[in-house]
Image (spheres, helix red, strand yellow):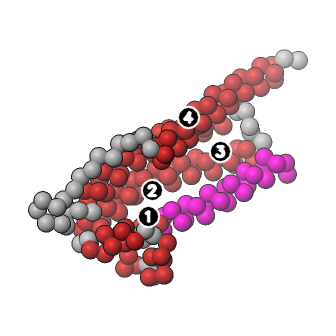
Amino acid sequence: MNTIQRYAKILTSMSIVFAVLVVIGTCAPWLHELFPAALWKFFPSNTIQDALLMPLSHRLMALFVSCISLAILCRGIIVFNRLMQSFYQGELFSQATAQQLHTLSKVALAWAVYTPIQSTLLGLITTLHHGIGKKMITLSISFGTHDMINLMVFGAFVLATGLIQEGSKLKQEQDLTV
């Protein structure tokens, strides 16, 4: 087993563990009755306090909004695991690898676009139960560190996709020469 295969196997395992933790972390604040109290020390206190005061219907709306980003993330993890499986099988420069990287870059773009939408919707949902004049909607489109990281990840996937496509073309040309 070479280095790429070893890292592909490690990254696949890590992504599965990460996916489980993210699912728990996404659902726990909104469905706090289903999770043990010891879990709460891992969450910011304002998130828990807001969720404890919210009626169930509002928490379910917040869970739905959070699950959209969870679906985007899970799609990314599935594509990432397929990519790692291709690397494990030795397909570094193939059209299938380039297609998986292209799909992964689309997922990264969807994540970067949905993140400010999610925070805006959650800001509104978490204040719906407040009285008249105390509801809050915030439009959090900023160019902060989190947004920069999302855009850099998207750019890295686009760059990697281009490199893999060029490598695939070179491999095809090399295979045709005798």
Main SS, magenta residues: helix
Cβ atoms at labels 3 and 4 below 8 Å apart: no
Dot 3 amino acid type: Leu
Q: Which element carries disc 3, helix, strand or loop?
A: helix
Q: What residue is shown at x 31% (from left), y 75% (from top)?
A: 52
Q: Position of residue 139 (x, y in %)?
A: 29, 46
Query: In terms of sequence position, does the residue under pointer 3 or pointer 4 come before the other?
Result: 3
Cβ atoms at labels 4 and 1 below 8 Å apart: no
Query: In terms of sequence position, does the residue under pointer 4 or pointer 2 come before the other?
Result: 2
Neighbours of disc 2 within 10 Å: few (<14), some (14-19), many (20+):
some
Going by the image, does 162 lie left or right of 143?
right
Dot 4 amino acid type: Gly
Query: In terms of sequence position, does the residue under pointer 1 or pointer 3 come before the other?
Result: 1
Which circle, 2 or 3, is nearer the viewer?
Answer: 2
Instruction: Quickly name the residue at label 1.
Output: 26
Query: In terms of sequence position, does the residue under pointer 2 or pointer 1 come before the other?
Result: 1
Instruction: Quickly name the residue at label 2.
Output: 70
Dot 2 amino acid type: Leu
Instruction: Quickly name the residue at label 3.
Output: 83
Instruction: Quickly name the residue at label 4.
Output: 155
Query: In terms of sequence position, does the residue under pointer 4 or pointer 1 come before the other?
Result: 1
Q: Residue extending furthest front?
A: 144
Q: Residue extending furthest bottom?
A: 37
Neighbours of disc 4 within 10 Å: few (<14), some (14-19), many (20+):
some
The answer to whether residue 172 is above or below residue 112 is above
Q: Which element carries disc 1, helix, strand or loop?
A: helix
